[in-house]
Amino acid sequence: MIDPPAALTSGARKPPEIVGSPRLPVPAGIGRLLVLAVVFLCAACGLVYELELVALSTYLVGDSVTQASVVLSVMVFAMGVGSLLAKRLRCRAAVGFGAVEAALALTGGVSAMALYASFAWCGQSRPAMVGFSLLIGVLIGAEVPLLMTLIQRIRDQDAGGAVADLFAADYVGALVGGLAFPFLLLPVLGQLTGALVTGGVNAVAGGALVLGLFGRDLSPRARRSLLAANILVLVLLAACTALAGPFERAAREAVYAAEPRVALQTDVQEVVLTGGTGGGRAGRSGGGAVRAPLALYLDGRLRASATDAFRYREALVHPAMAGGPHGRVLVLGGGDGLAARELLRYDDVESVTVVDRDSALVRLARTDPGLARLNRHALDSPRVRAVTADVFDWLRRDARHEVRRDGPYDVILADLPDPAVTTGAKLYSQEFYGLAARVLAPDGRLAVHAGPPRARPRNFWTVEATLRAAGLRTVPYRMPGRLHTFSGGPDRGQNGAGKASPEAVRYWGFVLAGRGTPPLELSPDTPPLRALTPAVLRSGRLALDRARPPGLPPSTLVHPRYGG
């Protein structure tokens, strides 16, 4: 009696391409290692695509927790869909894998450029972010079933062993890709070029595996089609890489409504300066073209404008200085030097300590002719000391030592990004304000920028409730600003591209706090101001007193309560 074939006894019919061993140009053991090496590279590339989508969408939209949750959840769902769809390709696994990798290389490579273009010229990037997350997830999900088929074609082994080998290479590749993105690709190549180079690696790896290892089993037409597809993908990625510089300049000009004069990607953030170097007035470039007034953007958010930077800084600085002694002042943030400029207008200010996490911004504030002119070279004053450190860590580690040595601070100014930006939420937490209160003099004042009170009232009043939860008495107030295409001060508008609604830019919100209720006033020795008056302070306080919502809980490190 002749034993039936194994395929029949198992009750399963193998797809045509699985039957028989492939005609490999190398021994089966080496072929298997090559497949696992490609799994490693593809996993690294796939994770880079994921991280690039999260990082760029966080920069463009803000709220990193929300963006990461949307990208990762959509992508994982799409990976499941891709795995199901790949079942139809198992009968032609080599061709299918080659096509999937070519599509993934092109899609993942251009995704960063497409998101930035959508943000710059269409005003929003969320639809593009979700679309690319779905497409990339589907393609990544299709890889595993096809690779499983290919690796079992080379050497038949039990499914558990094949899965273990495949996922071991996949997870190690993900580790390498996850570390390469923040430590190599992002700082060296940037987001656009980094994604394009990753796509090139992806295309070469997938194409080389299919054409080099399994090419003898492909029909001439399939080989020609895959070769042409991979060459086309590499040509497109190379062209996009060559055009990345001009594209980024054009997109920045569209985003900032002016040609960036300085654009730096520091270890902390993107710093962009637009406009001329002539202080608050429009100037002319060397070719005679009129330049707009200087504007400073941090991670796409307008941080200071020469036309009305005085409004925001006057409202932040001078009410806190009027409530009592102000010999020692601490500025948390403020690396642009503009808050220090206002502080140095007081002759009795003995020392100003500016703590900012971005040394490149502080250096730019000292050396750029436009920004240094705007801050009146405040950071070069012998009364000012600039410290490069994470503000939260500095308060927890170094501030108490300095207080023991030199005494507590009479005034603390929190000149920090908007609380709606998730990366800065800890700087608006109860723990943070508790640390600040420990280094504040008994009669000292803490002034906090709390975001736009009309555009994002819940965020504003959560800041106020958090200060009260830290044991401080509070006085909220607002300052009218000017209408801009982009929101003034540190706040960005809410329609995705920073183009703000009138409510988002009409007012800046502040909270003055102390152990006792601090007076909201201007003292007789307040230097001449351009916009802030006692009447403006009174109306700003009264308007917010009528708008206070009851019962808002404070924000903490483990339960942040700010949203976009």
Image (cartoon, rainbow, N blue to C red):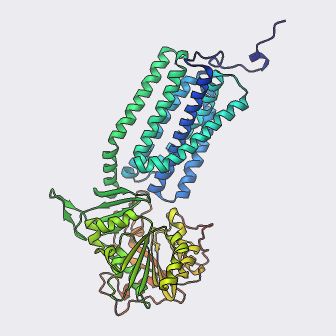
Q: Total of numbered circles in the picture? A: 0
Work out whether 530 lies above or below 121: below
Tell me which residue sits at (41%, 27%) in the image: 231
Q: Is residue 191 left or right of residue 210?
A: left
Q: Which residue is more in the foreground, 171 or 276?
A: 171
Estimate the x, y position of residue 58 in percent, counting from the top left.
Answer: 48, 55
For this orientation, the residue located farthest to the bottom is 524
Tell me which residue sits at (71%, 25%) in the image: 157
For this orientation, the residue located farthest to the right is 1
For this orientation, the residue located farthest to the top is 1
Tell me which residue sits at (24%, 65%) in the image: 277
Work out whether 23 lies above or below 293: above
Q: Is residue 307 left or right of residue 419?
A: left
Tell me the quadrant of the picture where the N terminus can be found: top right
Estimate the x, y position of residue 319 in percent, counting from the top left.
Answer: 41, 85
Q: Is residue 180 visible?
A: yes
Estimate the x, y position of residue 4 in percent, counting from the top left.
Answer: 79, 11
Q: Is residue 312 visible?
A: no
Work out whether 100 lies above or below 45: above
Q: Is residue 410 left or right of residue 483?
A: right
Estimate the x, y position of residue 555 in percent, counting from the top left.
Answer: 59, 71
Quarter holding residue 76: top right
